Image (cartoon, grey):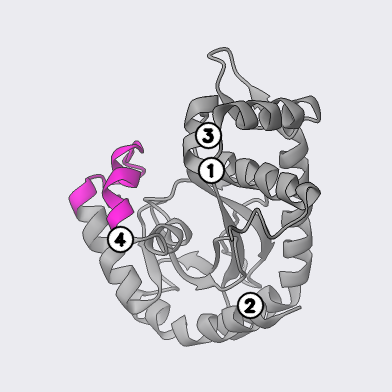
Amino acid sequence: MSRDQERPRGVQSVDRALDIIELLAGTSPLGVTEIAREVGLAPGTTHRLVAGLAARGWVRQDADRRYAVGPAALRLGDASYRALGTAAAPALREAVLETGETANLAVLEGDAMVYVAQSPSPHTLRIFAEVGRRVPLHSTAVGKVALAARPRDTWPELLAGRPLEPRTPHTLTTVAALTSELAAVREQGYALDDEEQELGVRCVAVPVPVGALEVALSVSGPTERLTREQAHEVVPVLRRIAAGLGDAP
């Protein structure tokens, strides 16, 4: 018996609609045929579901008759991020207390990381990343952590479809170099941004185990204070704090 056969029709419809929203949340706009293929539904069924979701603002149709996540889903995402940021505030303050540097929480959203919370360093010279700011994946520690969490066989396609713009002379801008970096990140369990996003700034990040979201915890500081050696030394602290975030109700 299939999963759909085991569930009432109303629950089946909810599952199918959520499958479509989750698909569109993680990819570029798709046509009905592509959506149907990805979620395993008949095109007619998919079209009816998508039309219903569009009527409520959960998906939107662009000029090419392709569908993307709509404003209703984005509002829900914003609320989720605010809740996550509020829940993470004590952990971020703990990270600042133990490392002396600015602590950040970022979430993967499409082809960028979005900062959802921050606790500033007490130092006069400190690093700011505004809440809500979107940053590239390839040039940031939080982005590398999120990419490294994806299956290895998806890296070439993911990276080939993204502009690996040189943010500084230190940015990794080739698929080969970044693939090698992601393999190391996956092996060691943390990522370093060594002046790759901004000159004079170093950042170290670890993944946060919070279910379906891809979340990273990081600390950032000036390179003269947050040396490479110190960045590696704070990793156990960040891992412990990230584990606590993942265990939080």
The residue wearing badge 1 is: 39
> Residues under labels 1 and 4: Cα distance?
22 Å
Q: Secondary structure at mark 4?
A: helix
Name the spot of residue 43 as percent of width and height, x first: 55, 28
In the rendered structure, the answer to whether residue 152 lies left or right of residue 84 reads: left
Tell me where residue 75 sits by quadrant.
top right
Q: Say which amino acid is labelled 1.
A: Val
Q: Position of residue 190 (x, y in %)?
A: 40, 73
Q: Secondary structure at mark 3?
A: helix
The residue under label 2 is 246
Q: Nearer the N terminus, badge 2 or badge 4?
A: 4
Disc 2 from disc 3: Cα separation:
32 Å
Spatial CA distance of label 2 from label 4 is: 23 Å
Residue 116 in view here = yes
Q: Using the image as rendered, state which of residue 196 and residue 249 is in the foreground.
A: 249
Q: Residue at position x 32%, y 52% from top?
A: 154
Tell me the distance, in whole angstroms, between the alpha carbons under discs 4 and 3: 24 Å
User: Which circle marks residue 35 in the picture?
Assistant: 3
| Tag shown at residue 152 | 4
Q: Are marks 1 and 2 in contact (CB under 8 Å)?
A: no
Q: Residue at x 66, y 45 (%)?
A: 16
From the viewer's side, name the closer residue of 61 and 127: 61
Which tag, 1 or 4, sits closer to the chain's start? 1
Q: Amino acid at mark 4?
A: Arg
9 vs 123: above or below: above
Q: Which residues are magenta?
A: 152-176
